Image (cartoon, rainbow, N blue to C red):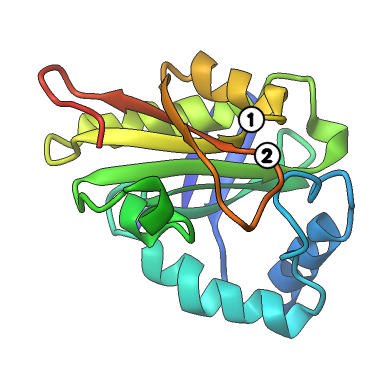
Amino acid sequence: MTESLETPRLSLRRFADSEADGRLLVELDSDPEVMRYIGPTGLTTVEAARELIRGRIIPSCVAGTPRGGWAAHLKPAGEFIGWFFLRSAPASLLAAEAGWTRPTDLEVGYRLRRAAWGRGLATEGASFLVERGLVDSTITCVLGMASAANLASCRVLEKCGLVRYREFVTPRFADPEVLYARCRDGCAHP
């Protein structure tokens, strides 16, 4: 399995079921501004973070592909800045509400520390995964989702070449969620 990927400014590595990785995720989720559009679902204990890694992130990894969860570290010092994922779209927590049922679609997402915001790092990491996801001829679309109020994340998805195709309302959030897609030629979004 590919254990690391490189972009010009980022080193992406697979998460491990380790206390260190658990601590990094808890620290990231402890910032209320990072969680502002995600909701109060942040990780509060290292054990909860390790369970997420064991139960959702590691199983989403597919050998020889960019699919799965990736811890993002800024080069050259290796400072942890957050994480990215490229996973089966039907595995999304809001897949049913979004209408994401096609197993040939992938979802791209990310969560970064505030210190990394406004520097193009979200676009760099997400674009990298979108491009590599669409290299796989079995993939129909790469999808993304963001709160309509989160203009920065909406812009990142657009910079990755994803096109806004609809909104939906969920009782989990006050603002609607915006759905984006980048599909292969001849394929329609879900």
| Vertical order, 181 against 22 (above or below) | above
The answer to whether residue 174 is left or right of residue 168 is right
Question: Which of the labelled discs sits on residue 148, or is there none?
Answer: 1
In the depicted view, which residue is nearer to us: 11 or 49? 49
Give the tally of numbered discs: 2
* Residue at 87 percent of width and 60 percent of height: 30
Q: Position of residue 116 (x, y in %)?
A: 80, 32
Q: Position of residue 84 (x, y in %)?
A: 56, 45
Q: Visible in this render: residue 18?
A: no
Q: Mark 2 = which residue?
A: 175
| Vertical order, 56 against 167 (above or below) | below
* Residue at 49 percent of width and 78 percent of height: 55
- Choose top left, top right, bottom left or bottom right for residue 44: bottom right
Q: Are marks 1 and 2 in contact (CB under 8 Å)?
A: yes
* Residue at 63 percent of width and 33 percent of height: 10
- Choose top left, top right, bottom left or bottom right for residue 79: top right
Q: Amino acid at mark 1?
A: Ala
* Residue at 52 percent of width and 78 percent of height: 54
